[in-house]
Amino acid sequence: MRLFRRAAPEPAAAPLPPPEGRPRFTFPAGGTARYGTAAAAGVAQEVPLPAGQVVVGRADGCDVLLHDPTVSPRHLVLEVGEKVLLRDLGSRNGTLVDGVPAVNASLVDGNRIEIGHTTLVFTRDAVDDDGGRQGGELE
């Protein structure tokens, strides 16, 4: 009688490293102030982007749900890690990054993503390294 050993299960994919800084989409509202409140900076809304896959579209179940009939139900996916990679999911109207059609793109701070009639601005704060101090402490 021959005994067979089961193959060891393949290790799970390593989780994506946490993003450097705080990646997010902002929905511009038309203001021009660079500092201050979100409203003063022309930001109508901010959506933080957690590490991992983030699906953007108009279908229920999307991580970023847009109420725009010109956006596909599952328009694009973001891979959020050390870098943020955008991939169009074969949308009908396409995706523009800074005015250029894009199927795949690596996003950088300040990119304007146009999908349908919606414009999103990708922003990422610089890493805030305070040396582990709590607020109010002196150096």
Image: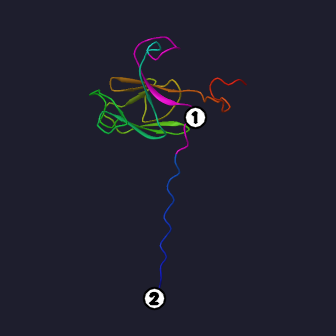
Label 1 neighbour load within 10 Å: few <14, some 14-19, many 20+: some
Q: Position of residue 60 (x, y in %)?
A: 29, 37
Quick check: 105 above or below 44? below
Q: Nearer the viewer, residue 92 or 76?
A: 76
Quadrant (top left/top right/bottom left/bottom right) for the C terminus: top right
Residue sitting farthest toward the bottom = 1
Q: Amino acid at mark 1?
A: Glu
- When asked about the image quadrant of residue 71, the answer is top left
Q: Position of residue 107 (x, y in %)?
A: 50, 31
> Which residues make up the magenta segment?
16-38
Give the labeled residue for mark 2. 1
| Residue 13 is one of the magenta-drawn residues | no
Around disc 2, counting alpha carbons within 10 Å, would you say few (fewer than 14), some (14 to 19), or many (20 or more)? few
Q: Secondary structure at mark 1?
A: loop
Residue depicted at 52% across the width and 48% down the height: 15
| Above-or-below relation of 32 to 135 | above
Q: Position of residue 75 (x, y in %)?
A: 35, 35
Q: What element does badge 2 sit on?
A: loop
Q: Three-letter amino acid code at disc 2? A: Met
Quadrant showing the N terminus: bottom left
Q: Which residue is at a point 46% across and 34% down the rendered structure image?
A: 49
As drawn, the label of residue 20 is 1
The chief SS type of the magenta part is loop
